[in-house]
Structures are given as structure tokens and as C-alpha cells.
């Protein structure tokens, strides 16, 4: 039985959880995207309801806060966070971890752009916008970007931070990503289902990358296990 995994249970669970999560998220995202294309981008009833709620519950202070939150979840502002998450997650060669974090975010944004062009969904009417926006609506770019960044940061904190502040720090990235997604609807520049699609895409992307990391780690362990050892007679 040399070279075989004597404790396959935890390892199988470690693979099955992200695999199942990726499949479920991919199915939901595909159904939502295809249905939206079939509707020629028309908003769903839940989109209309959320949009109307945002328009009727706007205040100057709340809009200013939403603008600050939404600005933090886009473009180059997110790359330092992704780099920090990768740096914390990689315990051996830190700079490789930082580059990996940036690569995860950058490639995820490319995937998001390709999908947005394919779905070709228009945004809500520009007269309802409380902030600037450009490009197609689904999936939301800010939402996808902040969600991917939040996952990278959470992994980094889980692996690289210890102490009493750790539980609080683990919650911050996810709450921030939720806030960014909500701000897009509140500012009137996205339908609610655009934001949901962004979260689903981030879930698929990060789960698939998690499976890749697990596969590479398993391969390294298997390679290390092939080294002959001398056993007492």
C-alpha cells in the first residue's frame, strides 16, 4: 500500500466541497446568463423592485457613502488588496504569492469582460444613475472584482494572520464585497441580477482556482511520497 493515501476522507472532502460549489455556481450563472440573453437584457421583476426601492430611498449622505464604497471595488484600487492576500497566503516565497494574487484578479476580470460582451445587457436608464458607469451590465464588474479580491484576502488572512483580531479580519473582506455589490444597485447603475451574476462568476472562478491549488499540492505530496525510505527489519 506504499504511496497510497491512507487518509483519503479529509482530502476527498477538501476536493468535493470546492468542486460542488463550482458546479452549482456555474449552473446558476449559466441559467441566469442564458435567460437574460433570451429576454434581450430586459430586467426581471426583482430587478425593477430593487431599482425602485433604491430610487425612493436615496439620501445625500447615503449616496456619498455608496460612492466611496463602490469606488473602492474597482480598477487598480483592488490590486494591492489582491497582492496582499496572495502574499499572506504564500508562506515560502512571498513575492510569488503577491503575483499570484494579482494574476487571479486580472484573469478573472478578463473572463468577466468576455462574458459581459456575450450577454450584452444594457444598464438601467442613465437618468436614474447617481454615479458614472460604462460598459455592459451583466455581470457587474465592480461586484466581480471586489468578490474575487475578497476571496483572495480571506484566504491570505486565514493562512497568514494569527491572534484575537483574526476572526474580525476574516469577516471584513466579505462584508466589503457585499457592500460594493449593494452600492451598484443603490446608485442605479446595475440591476440586482447583474450583481448576483458577478457574485456567481467570482464563486466559479475562485472555486476552480482552489481546485487547481489542491491538485498541485496533491501532486507535490505524491512526488515526495515516491522517495524510497528504509524501514527497520
Image: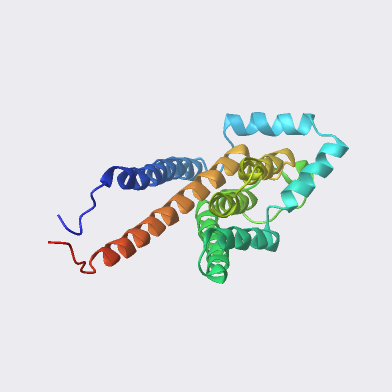
Report the residue that reaches farthest toward the right. 60
Q: Residue at x 57, y 39 (%)?
A: 193
State whether residue 82 is above or below residue 181.
below
Camera-nearest residue between 227 and 141? 227
State whether residue 131 is above or below residue 98.
above
**Total residue callouts:** 0
Q: Can you give x and y, in whole percent of width and height, for residue 55 in the image?
A: 77, 33
Q: Quadrant of the N terminus?
A: bottom left
**Left or right side of 69 for 232:** left
Q: Residue at x 29, y 66 (%)?
A: 224
**Left or right side of 199 for 8:** left
State whether residue 51 is above or below residue 121.
above
Q: Can you give x and y, in whole percent of width and height, for residue 69 in the image?
A: 74, 47
What is the quadrant of residue 13 in the picture?
A: top left
Camera-nearest residue between 6 and 154? 6
Q: Residue at x 24, y 69 (%)?
A: 227
Q: Quadrant of the C terminus?
A: bottom left
Q: Can you give x and y, in whole percent of width and height, for residue 43 in the image?
A: 59, 37
Q: Can you give x and y, in whole percent of width and height, for residue 94 in the image?
A: 56, 68
Report the residue that reaches farthest toward the front. 233
Camera-nearest residue between 102 and 64? 102
Q: How is the image coloured?
A: rainbow
**Left or right side of 117 for 169:** right
Camera-nearest residue between 187 and 77? 77
Q: Residue at x 39, y 54 (%)?
A: 211
Amino acid at each position: 500500500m506504499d504511496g497510497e493515501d491512507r487518509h483519503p476522507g479529509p482530502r476527498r472532502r477538501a476536493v468535493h466541497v470546492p468542486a460542488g460549489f463550482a458546479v452549482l455556481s456555474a449552473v446558476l450563472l449559466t441559467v441566469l446568463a442564458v435567460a437574460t440573453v433570451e429576454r434581450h437584457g430586459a430586467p426581471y421583476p426583482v430587478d425593477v423592485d430593487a431599482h425602485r426601492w433604491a430610487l425612493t430611498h436615496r439620501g445625500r449622505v447615503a449616496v456619498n457613502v455608496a460612492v466611496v464604497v463602490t469606488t473602492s471595488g474597482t480598477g487598480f484600487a483592488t490590486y494591492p488588496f489582491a497582492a496582499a492576500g496572495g502574499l499572506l497566503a504564500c508562506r515560502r516565497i512571498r513575492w510569488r504569492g503577491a503575483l499570484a494574487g494579482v494574476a487571479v484578479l486580472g484573469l478573472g476580470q478578463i473572463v468577466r469582460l468576455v462574458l459581459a460582451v456575450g450577454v450584452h445587457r444594457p444598464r438601467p436608464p442613465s437618468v436614474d444613475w447617481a454615479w458614472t458607469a460604462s460598459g455592459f451590465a451583466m455581470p457587474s464588474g465592480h461586484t466581480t472584482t471586489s468578490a474575487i479580491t475578497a476571496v483572495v484576502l480571506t484566504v491570505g488572512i486565514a493562512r497568514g494572520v494569527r491572534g484575537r483580531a483574526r476572526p474580525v479580519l476574516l469577516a471584513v473582506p466579505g462584508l466589503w464585497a457585499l457592500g460594493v455589490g449593494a452600492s451598484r444597485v443603490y446608485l442605479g447603475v446595475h440591476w440586482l441580477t447583474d450583481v448576483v451574476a458577478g457574485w456567481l462568476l467570482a464563486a466559479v472562478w475562485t472555486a476552480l482556482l482552489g481546485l487547481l491549488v489542491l491538485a498541485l499540492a496533491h501532486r507535490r505530496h505524491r512526488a515526495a511520497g515516491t522517495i524510497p525510505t528504509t524501514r527497520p527489519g
